[in-house]
Amino acid sequence: MTRPSNQKKAVVRNMAEVLWENPPGHSPGAISKMLVRPETAGSRLVDFRISTYQPMSHVEPHRHKVQEQIYHVIEGEGLMELDAKKAVVRPGDFVFIPPGVEHAVHNTGCGDLTFFVVTTPPDDE
């Protein structure tokens, strides 16, 4: 059976193949690998990335119009701001952020803060 030309293909890659980036609104020590996005894997509905923030690094408070996000902490310790309320996050913690909630992440720990982020849809338009 032949696959229609408009149908996407599955992707298998290793994280080592993806370069670190410093997204807009992030301090210099807050970097991410854009693992699954429309331009990296052909996804239509999801942005999946791993982020590492060095001590004192952060992303500025911001909100999304339509995007939902899930953060899952795998290493380190930091502070998550959700509509001006602050909570410490550690390995094993996950955070769900619906559209419209102002949020920020700060690495307040002594080592790197590493977490996965899942965002849907990939762009906030």
Image: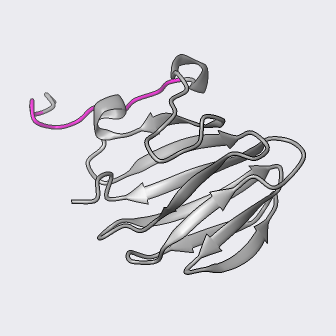
Tell me if residue 4 comes above or below residue 26 in the rendering: above
Side of 87 relative to 67 (left or right): right
Looking at the rendered image, the quarter that the C terminus falls into is bottom left
Looking at the rendered image, the quarter that the N terminus falls into is top left
Corner quadrant of residue 27: top right
**Residue 7 percent across, percent down from the top left:** 16, 37
Corner quadrant of residue 52: top right
Q: How many numbered marks, from 0 up?
A: 0
Residue at image location 75% in from the left, 52% down from the top: 107
Residue at image location 31% in from the left, 43% down from the top: 43
**Residue 55 percent across, percent down from the top left:** 79, 43
Tell me if residue 54 comes above or below residue 109 in the rendering: above
Tell me if residue 103 comes above or below residue 56 in the rendering: below
Residue at image location 35% in from the left, 30% down from the top: 40
* Residue range (magenta): 4-13
Corner quadrant of residue 63: bottom left
State the predominant SS element of the stretch in magenta.
loop
In the rendered structure, does residue 66 fall within the stretch colored magenta? no
**Residue 65 percent across, percent down from the top left:** 30, 70
In the rendered structure, does residue 12 fall within the stretch colored magenta? yes
What is the residue that sits farthest to the right in this orientation? 110
Relative depth, front residue between 62 and 68: 62
Relative depth, front residue between 55 and 35: 55
Relative depth, front residue between 44 and 71: 71
Residue at image location 23% in from the left, 36% down from the top: 8
What is the residue that sits farthest to the left in this orientation? 5
Side of 80 relative to 14 (left or right): right
